Image (cartoon, helix red, strand yellow):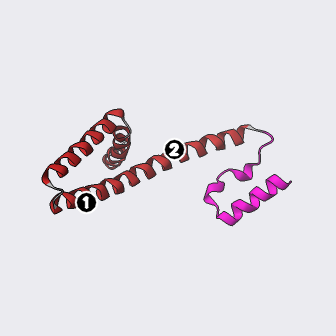
Amino acid sequence: MDSEHRHIHRFAMIPEVATRLAGSVWASMIVAGLLVGLLVYGAITGFPHGWQTFVYSAGAVLSVLMLFLLQHTTNRETKAILVKLDELIQSSDQAHNEVMGLEHQPLHHQEKVQERLHDG
């Protein structure tokens, strides 16, 4: 593997590791602890404007980060499922090969194939 591919592979591992960490029990416990701490601190200090700004900004940044991690995981899992389904289609004599790669076709084409297969 050349240097460029190694860098791409390393970069691609970042969301994999982040997804595993974000979905762990420890991450949930840490976040719950931080939230309780933030609420207690806010209550003690009277919920100042700086505290509110920090909480809203941190929430927005974390929400966007989680959105990208969820999308990455969904794309990876969907691709794996499609590869497995294609393998099943290829191994079955009664399957219709035209459905392989259907996810790359426009929606109207997918609907036509579905109608043809389920009505016929």
Does 61 sit left or right of 97 as displayed?
left
Q: Is residue 85 above or below residue 101?
A: above
Coordinates of residue 84 in the picture (x, y in percent)? 61, 40
**Residue 10 occupies which quadrant of the picture?**
top left
Q: Position of residue 12 (x, y in %)?
A: 37, 47
Q: Quadrant of the N terminus?
A: top left
- The residue wearing badge 1 is 57
Task: Name the image quarter holding the C terminus.
Answer: bottom right
Foreground of the two, 2 or 20: 20
Where is residue 39 shown, x and y percent of the image? 23, 48
Residue 77, label in figure: 2
Give the total number of marks visible in the rendering: 2
Residue type pointed to by label 2 = Glu
| Residue 113 quadrant | bottom right
Judging depth in this view, the residue of 102 and 49 nearest the camera is 49
Q: Residue at x 72, y 37 (%)?
A: 91
Amino acid at the residue labelled 1: Ser
Q: Is residue 22 above or below residue 55?
A: above
In the image, which disc is placed on residue 87? none
Which residue occupies the foreground of this view, 81 or 52?
52
Mark 1 vs mark 2: in front: 1
- SS at badge 1: helix
The one nearer the camera, 120 or 91, is 120
Q: Which residues are magenta?
A: 93-120
Taking 119 as reference, is 21 above or below it?
above
Residue at left offset 34%, top offset 43%: 18
Question: Which secondary structure, mark 2?
Answer: helix
